Image: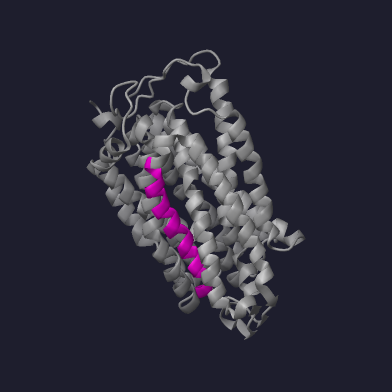
Amino acid sequence: MSAAPAFADGYRSRRILNWMLVGLLYAFFYMTRYNYTALGPLLLDAFGWTKKDLSFLETAMPFIYGLSVLVNAPLADKIGGRKAFLIGAVGVVVFNILFGLCHLLVLAPPVITGEGKARVIVTAAQIAGGLTPRQLAYVLSGVWACNAYFQSFGALSIVKINAQWFHTSERGTFGAIFGVLIRLGLVLGFSVVPFIASLLPWYWGFWIPAAGVTLFGVLTWAYVVETPEDAGFPPFDTGDALMGEPGERVGVLVVVKKVLSTRTMWTIALASVMIGFVRRSVVDAWWPAYFKEVHHVQGSDALYQATAWGIALAGIAGGFTLGILSDRVFQTRRAPVVVMGFLGMATCLALFWGADALALGGVAACLCMALLSFFVNGAHGLIGGAASMDFGGRRGAATAAGLFDGMQYFFAAPFTGLLVGWITQDYGWQVWKLWPLPFALVGAAVMATLWNVLPRGRTAGH
């Protein structure tokens, strides 16, 4: 087990300042990514879309995001997390503003009757330039794909920066804190954005989050530093995977080769893809539309808000529970705890299906969603937050995060976007719940092969 590090005077307080600012900026990145999903039911009515139209955007975002993190990860390792974060912030603000401005393209709203399978678009929306609603969906998919490109700098940057500041013995717990930020961002997206849309026109749900990114982007520019050395502290041995000699400048190609050359890294990446199938299919994407159609609740209703907060709080609890188990019980081994997470996901999906099969109502569905979030967030935090730093090291942290996070989004995109839109439109929500269950079982089997693996090529007991 890695020895606990000794910290210089003032180190912890300076790290907290760094962490809080980049963490809150990352949370607002999430708000400007999932505001679209939270507003999906409103956009269906505003533009006269079907769920298949909606699925184009749900596909474009993760596909381009996944491709972009793979491309931008070496760039973030080269230029540093702080600069990469600020580049991303500028782009995120621009394309959220542009998406909101697209409401001006609707010359006359659609006429719609019924909901769910009984929903009928009586008269299509009139769109500027003679566009059809589906063609407008293609246009907005392009806008949202551009947002996804700049969103990709977020996870890379936060992992890159914090890989310089956190020792391996702390990183399971760091993964939990990483999960807190994800859940905070999802609360901002899934709870606060619908509240904004209940008071103001829907496009403010894109503009107000963009203002939040602007604020914390400026604060990050003013106060965040890349490394402990930049803040005046002595060099800090983080205890992670070694790459080059201390102080040596390591080229991007060396980092990429190191990160992509081991079976361990590819196994973790495959497990990340399996998490993506579950996470993007249910927890992070389609559930607002499910609650609207099945349980007839809107974004400002109590049951919807309880679900949004339940997903967030249970996800935070899962992150800390699995992260602390990994650090303290399993001696920095990530795989055993991630296996537990995958098995928990499979169980929760089966329970979720049973809740509606037995007509237990919206409260039961809310509880199932929260419990699923517990396991999804715990596993994702360990892979995206801890393992990427452990096995990528200080110099390769962003590239490792790009591999894990990018493959999760890239390969999940067609399955959790177009395919889920088709499943929910033609086969209903019960099939949607069972759809990702096999992937959770595959993920458990894959991570079980790394049961005793530790950073720096060690195994438990050696």
Instruction: Check the image and report above or below for 244 versus 419.
Output: above
Q: Is residue 236 at all visible to an observer of this figure?
A: yes
> How many numbered marks appear?
0
Q: Quadrant of the C terminus?
A: top left
User: Bounds of the magenta span?
Assistant: 52-74
**301 left or right of 95?**
right
Q: Is 135 drawn above or below residue 446 in the view shown?
A: below
Rendered location of residue 243, percent (x, y): 29, 29
Provide residue 196's location: percent of width, then percent of height.
72, 56
Q: Residue 251, percent across and down? A: 31, 34
Q: Nearer the viewer, residue 371 or 439?
A: 439
> Residue 116, located in which quarter of the rendered image?
bottom right
**Residue 283 locus on image (x, y percent):** 50, 56
Which residue is located at x 47 percent, y 63 percent? Answer: 60
- Extreme residue toward the front, this view: 129
Residue 317 seen by the camera: no
Residue 443 is inside the magenta segment:
no
Residue drawn at (37%, 38%) of the image: 387
Residue sitting at the far right: 199
Q: Quadrant of residue 42?
A: bottom right
Identify the residue at image location x=64%, y=70%: 296
Residue 437 drawn above or below residue 216: below
From what the image shows, is residue 326 above or below residue 271?
Answer: above
Q: Quadrant of the image for the N terminus?
A: top left
